[in-house]
Image (cartoon, coloured by chain):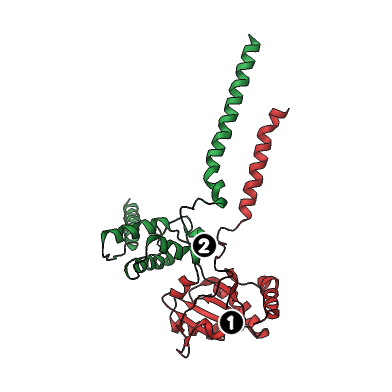
Chain colours: A green, B red
Amino acid sequence: MNWLRLLLISVLLSFHSQSFAAIETYQFDSVEQEEAYKELIFELRCLVCQNQNLADSNAELAQDLRQQVYEMLTKQNASKDEIVDYMVARYGEFVMYKPPVEPNTYLLWVGPFLFLLIGLWILIRIIRSNQQNNELDK
Amino acid sequence: MKKQSMPLIIFGALVIVLAIGLTLDPKDVPSPLIGKPASEFSLPELYTQEPFSPTQLKGEAWILNIWASWCVSCRQEHEVLVEFSEKYPTKIVGLNYKDTPEEAKAWLKQFGNPYQITVEDQQGRAGIDWGVYGVPETFVIDKKGIIRHKFTGPMTRKRVNDELKPLLAQIDKEPS
């Protein structure tokens, strides 16, 4: 039993240190700047661990990109759009965690609703044919 | 008959779509930098500490290889690069990404040095400017300083023969 407790403690401890690794201390000049920083690291994708954004990722590239976002905001006074443009120019549109609504992403945005409509249409047809069958039976 | 085969048809269509999805490589993000002028940087050369920047190579085609001593697949591609550099005159610039000069030098001593110039990017700043998200990456730059191609992941003999050599031959014919 003792070794089990030891194992549990060591597992919990490892979580502890991991959760701390992601915290960086950045000083901002204004609240708006900090807000913009937080929004940006949520909107930009970490290219290494592709299904995470910069805020969630602990990859070295994500750390570097967070640093880059921070410096552009504080030192160059760049706007949010300017930073997103900067990233897109280098990493492509894929860097945006939320894809923009553009002709080549219409299917992506409209697709789910399209499937919903098709499903509804099939459902209605099945219900109607069942009703007809029932009436015929009578 | 038609009604009964419907689920099978839908299932078949789904299998085809998912099978196509499996053959795509999500790591292969198309670079928006292709067709754009190469990003400028000024970084110290590994051995001489003299600053190097891409404009110095204007007028000739060259290759930028991003590597690091901590990168496992760089080791895998390295012998391909060494082999290429022995046979072809095209300059290969090595961008030593987030590494220490000592380890970089030791690595080149051990595995051979295919680079005419090796530059240190300890902070990874030039890397960000070139849209680097994984090492190794290899860019081909033409005589006008335009990025023509990007290889993500390790170079292989097949990539060199099928893609790199034809591209360099094509660039060679273009006016400088």
For badge 2, the amino acid type reads: Gly
The quarter of the image holding the N terminus of chain B is top right
The residue wearing badge 2 is A92
Q: Is residue B11 left or right of residue A54?
A: right
Judge whether B93 appears above or below B133 on screen.
Answer: below
Are the residues under badges 2 and 1 in a single subunit?
Answer: no
Residue B162 at x, y = what percent?
Answer: 70, 71
Q: Residues within 10 Å of mark 2 (few under 14, many from 20)?
A: some
The residue wearing badge 1 is B92
Q: Is residue B45 visible?
A: no
Measure how far apart labels 2 and 1 are at the Cα level.
Answer: 25 Å
Q: Chain of mark 2?
A: A
Q: Residue furthest top?
A: A138
Residue A61 at x, y = what percent?
Answer: 44, 66
Residue in the picture at 43% in, 61% down:
A84
The quadrant holding residue B38 is bottom right
